[in-house]
Amino acid sequence: MGKTSKDKRDIYYRRAKEEGWRARSAFKLLQIDQECRIFNGVSKTIDLCAAPGSWSQVLALKLNENYKKALEESSAASPPKIVAVDLQAMAPLEGVIQLQGDITNTNTAKEIIAHFDNTQADLVVCDGAPDVTGLHDMDIFIQSQLLLAALNITTHILRPGGTFVAKIFRAKDVTFLYAQLRIFFSYVYCAKPSSSRNSSIEAFVVCKNYSPPEGYEPHMLNPLLTHEPCDFQKLTGVNRVIVPFVVCGDFSQPDSDTSYPLNYKGEKYKYHEPVQTPIVPFYEEALSLSRSRDFHMADVSVIIENENMNTISLFKKTVLQQSQTEMNVEAKTVQQDQDEDETPIDMLQNLYVSDANKVNN
Ligand SMILES: C[S@@+](CC[C@H](N)C(=O)[O-])C[C@H]1O[C@@H](n2cnc3c(N)ncnc32)[C@H](O)[C@@H]1O
């Protein structure tokens, strides 16, 4: 792929580099704010699932603007506080406290809470996305778990009246997530910024006026969402919630699904390097394996057996075909087992158990 190919395909990607944002996601948060005014009066905030850090950049910018305004009114204004958390390491950002950890882990939650030292946050944002597996139900399940982990942390730290913004996948059971959120917030909107591709099921819940039910005690072990089968039509009252859908970003903004020419609207195109290259790129291991041809111990036989196979790309193709056949066989077996006695939830649980066993062994 050429250096400019991603620039050509995606106007928000190249604009992010031109304007100094670490990722195109920055525009999503900015457009959500244009429509929902999420930064008004905010000085303390948490950015969950923050790497590489473009939302933290937006937060730093907006909170510093608020601080300057507050100082004009009173010298007692408190400086901004931003705590950013991610599984992955993030390059430093001025004014942002960075933690590395899993937000579904109680210890990470405790660490975040400790940083607030008995004070409360005005805003919690979460752009968490799992590494998509391609298994839709699994991806949606993990995404909803991230959102609920974020909500759990939020219930410990958000001040009454505060705001929570989080990525969701608009999938089959999203209404139940909305219903859970409406228990804690007076207003829940589903926002779709124009920089988020139409083709993506991604959207953002914007939840305003945090007001937990009377007597609610935050607890990290609260399972907020049980994945019991549930019929939406049978829900009533607060449990049956239709959340308003809001499109963010005005219509003059470029469309995120369209490829624009590099000289769009007469702009003179200049290539920009990425603002922040990954600290540990996910493709690093694959590259080094590819260079050393050391794909997998079991695959070495393929190279030896195929003396005519001179190029690594042919080798890769064969390995891919082999694993595809293996996956098909495996999928058939899983399907047969499932047909016999397993529900999809059983299957998910079994997957987790077998993964945990692999780790423990
Ligand atoms: C779409 S990216 C976030 C982009 C970020 N908002 C920005 O503007 O730069 C999603 C992030 O979620 C993080 N993530 C996924 N699962 C997580 C977890 N369980 N705990 C913490 N971070 C997680 C990933 O490491 C990834 O960096």
Image (cartoon, rainbow, N blue to C red):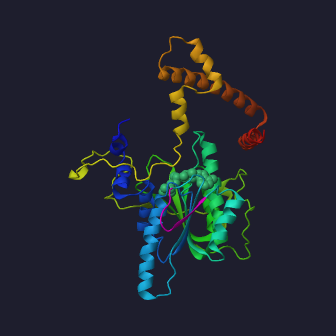
User: For the point 69% across and 74% down, which residue is it?
Assistant: 213
User: For the point 50% across and 78% down, which residue is it?
Assistant: 79
x then y, percent, for residue 341: 79, 35
Q: Which of 113 and 202 lies nearest the eye of the viewer? A: 113
Q: Which residues are magenta?
A: 91-99
Q: Is residue 146 above or below residue 34?
A: above
User: For the point 35% across and 43% down, which residue is it?
Assistant: 9
User: For the point 59% across and 48% down, which residue is it?
Assistant: 130
Q: Residue furthest front?
A: 292
x then y, percent, for residue 208: 55, 71
Q: Is residue 333 above or below residue 223?
A: above
Q: Is residue 92 magenta?
A: yes
Count of residue discs: 0
Q: Is residue 91 above or below residue 83?
A: above
Left or right: residue 70 compared with residue 119: left
x then y, percent, for residue 355: 72, 40
Q: Report the quarter where the C terminus lies.
A: top right
Q: Is residue 315 magenta?
A: no
Visible residue check, residue 114: yes
Q: Report the quarter where the N terminus lies.
A: top left
Visible residue check, residue 155: no
Q: Is residue 81 above or below residue 307?
A: below
